[in-house]
Structure formats: structure tokens, C-alpha cells
Image (cartoon, helix red, strand yellow):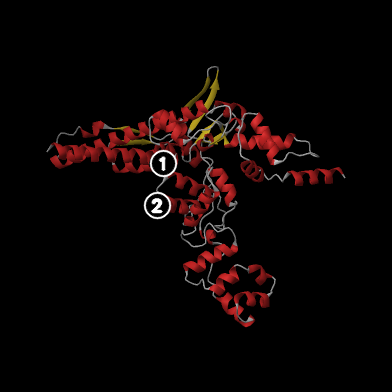
Amino acid sequence: MLQGLSQRQTQTMSGQMLHSLTILGMSSEELSDYLAERAQANPCVAYRPPAAFTRARSEDFDAVAAIASDRPSLLAHVAEQIELAFPQTADRLIALRFAEALEPTGWLGQPVDTIAMLANVPEARALRILDRLQSFEPAGLFARNLAECLTLQAREADLLTWEVETLLANLDLVAKNRLKELADLCDCETSDIPDIMAQLKGLNPKPGLAFDHTPAPVLPPDLIATKGPDGWTVELNRATSATITVQEDRLADGTASTEARAARRRALAEARSLAQALERRGDTLLRTAAVLVARQAHFLDRGPAYLAPLTLEDVAAELGLHASTISRAVSGRMIQTPTRALPLRAFFARAVGSSHDNDGVSRDSALQFVRRAVEREDPENPLSDGAIVDLAERSGLRIARRTVTKYRLSLGLGSSYDRRRQALARKR
């Protein structure tokens, strides 16, 4: 008997926790719509919409621009598949880095080595993640070029013969009409090339265009950060917060039937549970933002070069919560600072090594160091990547030479030879 009671209590608690986590992950607009629905269905819930949404919908709302598309967004489509395909958090975060790099066509808009650098993982691991991403539907997503896009689709359609694969690997010959050379590579006659190409006619070179690319409407930030004499403080933006009131007096009718009273008790229990979930949501958002602002005060004061290493796990440990809860709390959230609105994700940074302390510095700081080093160099005697490594070491920053090279490339900076040649050309 006691075991059964314990199981029922555990199931109830798990259901309440799941409900709270679901509400935590909702955007302010999603939450507002959800609460409005619950108020319609539950007489014990009195709903008040957020003031910011009410004003936006009545005064500044562009009804034509806001017509909802019947197509899902490309990012939402792949994010849903990522959740299912990557149960491990670390792999899922790398996969999301790839998703963020998708062009509207469905192709990758960044080189794999750049994505690996941004995710702070070896390129080989990033390639393994990419291999799984390229199995997503529709076939052809996450391709790095036209040939790879069509190859993925041909393989999915069971069309990838040796001849087709060879033709796709040499599309430049098709564009130049060098069919005799292509036929030699495919080990066929020139007259066979049109038949091989005909097999590709049903393939889609831009599978991402099947999805909606209308940008989401920009809504007011969920949080507000201000700086006073005692430092930074954070508060919830009440203008974006929908509220409910539990109306317990709806149960006062003593003449109702037993069945009606039971239904009202259930409605009241649901209303109270919803109110508690809302309170927990606000508390979690506020506590999370407070930690981010406190830990990244120098970033807010001075800019990205002063972003300290900080991960979801760090914040979770400080608050005594799970990292997945922090991930839900920061996903899609914006915070208004005195100068601009920032996504909460901007407060996180992976560390690179430091010779002076155990905490290291953030990747953003290292990127800024490389950029500043090149900006301040003698244009006619530019710094090699090795020299930048030595300069960083003298400044207390330990970076591998290959990391400096990746950072330099991601910043669009040429090699020391290229920079010197450009400087001499300008001098002439």
C-alpha cells in the first residue's frame, strides 16, 4: 500500500515538474497564448495579457507582415530532428552550431573548421556530427556545395551509381561542356552523358527553400538589466509577463452536484498548479539572469573582449539546478541593457587556456586578442601566427598555433605573407 502511494506521489511530482519545465521553455508570446487558452477552459483561471503585446497588437502591429506561413521555418524543422537524433547534450550543442550556419538554401554557410572552432571541438568530431546531420529529411540539407547536396539526394533516392557519383564530383566539366573528358572519367560514351544527367532532374539543388524564412517578429525583452552605485541588477520586464489570478470563489456554490463539485476541485487544483509553475518560471528566469549579469559584469561594462568563460553547467551548479533547466531558461530570451538588447546566450563562452590562472579566458577574448594583435602590427613586418602565439603567452594567454590560425581565418585575416604583400601594394 505504501509502495503504491509512493509511486503515485512520484508520478504526480514528475508531472508537475514536466509542466513547470514546459512553461519555462515557452517564449513570452507562447506563454501568453497558452494562458489565454487555459483561462477559456478553466473557470478558476482569470487571465491578464501582457501590456507590451496588447500595445503591439493594437498600435504597431503590421497585420500583413504577421500573416503566419503554413510552412515551418528551416531552423525549427532541423532543431526538432536534432532533439531526436542527439540525446547527448554536448553533441546536440554542436549540431545546433551547424543549424545556425544554415543558409536559406539548406546548405552550410560556414566551413566545418570554423563551426568546430566556434563549438570548441576538434574538426574530426564536428565532421562526425555533420555526417549524422546530412541524414536528415529532406535529403540534401547541410550540404557544403551543390555536388554534395545532389549526392545526398541521389543516395537517398537510390540513384547513386558509380557513373552518377563521378558526374556529380565533376560538375565543373558539365558547366564547361567538356563532355568527352567527363565521359572518359565515367568510362562511358559521350552520348551516354545526357542519360546520366537525366537521372538528376528530379533532385532539388536548394532543399531549404521549401521552408519558411520569414523572420520572427521582434518582441520586447523578457528581462531588464540596470547599473547603479552598487553594481548591476536585474528585474523581470513586467510589460511582457502575462499573469493569472486563481479565482477560488467559483467553488462557493453549495447546491451543485457531487460531480460538478469534483470538476470544480480539479479546476481549482489545475489553476493553483499553473500559478505555481508561473511563479517558478519567473523565479528561475530572474535567478539565472542575475548570475549571468554578476559573472559577466566586465562584459557589460567593456564589451566582448572582457567576456569571461561561463557555461550552462557553471550557472546550473551555482543555482543548484540541472543544466537542461538553464538551457530552457535562456533559450530565445533577451535582456535589455542601458545600451542595447542582448540574447542571454551571449553571456556564455567556452574557455581557452591561460598560463596565469585555472579559469582561462573566453574564446571571444582570444579572438579579440588575435584581432587586436594584427591591427597593431607593423604592416610592413606583420606578425606570423607563431609570433602571435608568443605575444599571447607574454600576455598570460596560452593558445596553440593552429588555434591562432583558425581564429585569424574566422576573422577574415590573411597570412602574414598576404598582409605584407597587401601593405606593400598599398604603399605603391
| Residue 323 horizontal/vertical position (percent) | 41, 37
Residue drawn 55% across and 53% down?
A: 102
Residue drawn 42% across and 43% down?
A: 30
Q: Earlier in the sequence, mark 2 or mark 1?
A: 1
According to the picture, the residue beneath numbered tag 2 turns out to be 84
Which quarter of the rendering shows the N terminus?
top left
Label 1 packing within 10 angstroms: few (<14), some (14-19), many (20+): some
The answer to the question of whether label 2 and label 1 lie on touching residues, with beta carbons closer than 8 A, is no
Q: Secondary structure at mark 1?
A: loop
Label 2 packing within 10 angstroms: few (<14), some (14-19), many (20+): few
The answer to whether residue 204 is seen in the rendering is no
Q: Which mark is residue 26?
A: 1
Residue 162: image quadrant is bottom right
Residue 204: image quadrant is bottom right
| Residue 112 horizontal/vertical position (percent) | 57, 51
What kind of residue is marked 2?
Answer: Leu
Which quarter of the rendering shows the C terminus?
top right
The residue most toward the right is: 428
The answer to whether residue 194 is seen in the rendering is yes
